[in-house]
Amino acid sequence: MPASVHISLNVSDLERSVDFYRRFLGEPAKRKSDYAKFVSASPEIHLALQPAPRVSLAGGSLSHLGIRVESVDEVLKWKTALGARGVTTEEEKTESCCYAVQTKFWISDPDGNRWEVYTVLEDVEVKAEAGMTCCQPRTEAVGQGGEERSLSVAACC
């Protein structure tokens, strides 16, 4: 399986969004009461939808972006290559996230947009506990031109 693009959107109304993307991309590949994932074939895109309170949507509906690769070895190759090019990566780990066990690491662009490079080891039926999952929004300080600002970012797939 070649690498594919992953996009995660925060949505205000999951049912309405699922209906829209069902008409746009077809039936979801994974559907839970609080999560939906669509996978298109051409181009290959993995689109995840997660409900978020309206207040979280003030900064936009983008949760994060990702590149899904075939294996843990590929995750490590990406991490090594990015490090060699001077890109700071966050901790690589294996965790249950968005109804799947994944191995991943994260990077952030200068504007705070989050990217994950990951592989799915297995699908699971139960979402990790709130506060224990990577899918929960978190706040972080980002220095930009000597200023610090807080960004609400989600860290999941």
Image: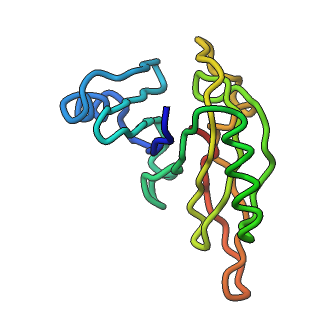
Q: Is residue 61 left or right of residue 76?
A: left
Q: At 48% across and 38% down in the image, what residue appears?
A: 2
Q: Is residue 15 left or right of residue 106?
A: left
Pick the front one: 67 or 124: 67
Say which quarter of the image contains residue 113. bottom right
Check the picture and name the quadrant holding the C terminus: top right
Pick the front one: 24 or 51: 24
Say which quarter of the image contains residue 60. bottom left
Q: At 72% across and 77% down in the image, what residue appears?
A: 143
Q: How many marks?
A: 0
**Image x and y of residue 106, in percent:** 68, 51
Q: How is the image coloured?
A: rainbow
- Can you name the residue that lies furthest to the left here? 23
Q: At 24% across and 26% down in the image, what residue appears?
A: 26
Pick the front one: 86 or 14: 86
**Image x and y of residue 92, in percent:** 78, 44
Can you say whether 40 is above or below 127 in the image? below
Q: At 32% across and 33% down in the image, what residue appears?
A: 40
Pick the front one: 91 or 131: 91
- Can you name the residue that lies furthest to the bottom here? 145
**Image x and y of residue 136, in percent:** 64, 39
Q: Is residue 85 left or right of residue 65?
A: right
Can you say whether 43 is above or below 78 in the image? above
Can you say whether 11 is above or below 89 in the image? above
**Image x and y of residue 74, in percent:** 66, 41
- Can you name the residue that lies furthest to the top here? 125
